[in-house]
Image (cartoon, helix red, strand yellow):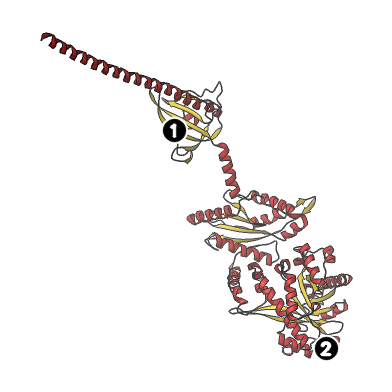
Amino acid sequence: MTDDIQSRRLEREISARKQAEALLEQKSLELFIQANERQEVLDALKESEERFRLMVQFSPDAIMIEADGQIVFANASARQMYKETVQNILLGKTLDELALYENPHNKINVSENEIELISMRLDGMPLEVAVRFVNLVYGGSQARQVIVRDISERKKLEYQLEYQASHDALTGISNRAALLMKMQEAITFAGRHGFPVWIVFIDFDHFKSINDRFGHRGGDQVLSIISARLRSVLRKNDALGRYGGDEFILVLSGGPESELNSQFLDRIMKIAHEPIFIDHHELRVTCSLGVSSFPADGDTTQKLLDHADAAMYRAKESGRNLYQFYNAEIQAKVLERAEIEGSLNFALDRDEFFLHYQPQIDLRTGQIVGAEALLRWQHPDLGILMPDRFIKYAEATGLISRIGTWALLQACEQCMSWHRAGLGRLRIAVNLSVRQLNGLDLIELVDTALSVSGLPPDCLELELTESLMMSNVELSLNTLRALHDKGVQIAVDDFGTGYSSFTYLNRLPLDCMKIDRQFVSNLGKEGELESEIITRTLIQLAHNLHLRVIAEGVETPAQLQILRDQGCNEIQGFLYSPALSARHFEARVREHKLEDWQGHTTAPSLRQVL
């Protein structure tokens, strides 16, 4: 009995020991696994730390650690970036000494994670950088990691882009966008303090002739030289910009009680006129200036520009090489221009244009041989307008092509109707605009006008000013030769008032030369022998080139006699008749008496004419 109890007790102790051993074995296994895992972690951490050390050491960014107010670690990039030498040890420096403090005045740009600022190298040179600050524990103490990236090259490109966006590539002065911004800033400041601002609109006279003579390279050189001269006269708060082409704007800021004196404007014109040498040729340039002032002439940049532009055009109309202040008279013209341009858009559709015809007389036979078609506009509010009131606006708005097309078709049809009415083989002269001459469809347009009307080609004479033909000589030559080959007559109008070359005059397929009225008007006046010499010379030149000569603006018997004696072929003007409606022109031709002109009679009265 006792043995059984002892046996069971031993069995229980053995079982307990086995369980304890099993538990101890399991615990040992867990400890072994944990020990292995801990070693792996330690190994991984060691590897990570080594990898981090290598990344920091060889990073292209400068990485420094600041602790206790000093730099205690700096990688190779930091030492190189800040130009560390043996004498300038980076370690021990403060961030303030490197201008890496977070000072709002030093910040260029701030983002969520970094700031851009101008740091200072150890050699004293500035350095544009992007900086990030990261808090960390270093050596058991709180510290900051400073990561610095050199952004100098990127900033240089940004500055270049910014410069290009605000400066004219040719002259280096402000471009149009930057100029308008400076104007607005000047106006805003002046309005706040009650100061004046003057806008000076500068346009060079006959600049196209410079491009034609020296090419665009020569023209660009002239603009660069003159813009540098203009820049030299500016004061600190003034601005100069290129508005476009050969147009420049000066923004002159004034102070209390200041005025813009004429001496300053004279100086601008004087320095523009100083000699310029292009390809060993001396060149002198003149300019026309228009001036508007704030607040008297407008309170916005656009108004001031428009008014200065209007004043500049007034200076050109007055003879060029002048300056003109904006005034009430110019304001009236600006308002008229706005009204005319607004009405021009609808004038053709409303059938408001019409043609008058001025007779042309053959001085040898005394016969009416043709007429010049002259455009008129029955404006709904301003009455009948002559071309000088609206043609320039039609050209500016691009409507001249449509108007010119209408006039050509109308004139050809009217001339052919006179042929059918038995008035003889009359010729009709029609003026062309620069847009028509340079257009690609002029030849097709003329073909259409002749085809629709039935008018013989040699009864159509196209009149072009010499400056118009010189605007694009090669295109003019090709177009005019094609028209001339069809039999159309070509006349050069206002000859002697432009800048054409005799070489080109000889190459152009011309049939007729018209002497401008400004030469004719002084014929027969006491002390005006120069005009007689000019007209005689022009007539001889035309005849040597086998051209017919028409003098326009003939108003007195004395003018008629001089022109007849000089060999002029034809005349037109108030001495015989003003421009007439088609009906009155037909009546005039039927009533015409040859003996009146062969006998040098005086002009009939307007009552007889009409």
CB within 8 Å, label 1 to label 2: no
Q: Quadrant of residue 287?
A: bottom right
Say whether residue 106 is visible: no
Name the mark on residue 462: none
Q: Identify residue type, mark 1.
A: Phe
The C terminus lies in quadrant: bottom right
Task: Identify whether 327 is placed above or below 362.
Answer: above
**For marks 1 and 2 on the same chain, the one whose residue lies earlier in the sequence:** 1
Residue 141: percent from left, percent from top: 38, 24
Along the horizontal axis of the image, is 356 left or right of 28? right
Q: Identify residue type, mark 2.
A: Asp
Q: Quadrant of residue 33?
A: top left
Task: Identify whether 131 is placed above or below 336.
Answer: above
Which residue is tagged 1?
A: 133
Residue 340: percent from left, percent from top: 60, 73
Which residue is tagged 2?
A: 596
SS for dot 1 = strand
Task: Identify whether 303 is placed above or below 462.
Answer: above
The residue furthest top is 3
Task: Identify whether 87 is placed above or below 491.
Answer: above
Nearer to us in this view, 233 or 472: 472
Q: Quadrant of residue 408?
A: bottom right
SS for dot 2 = helix
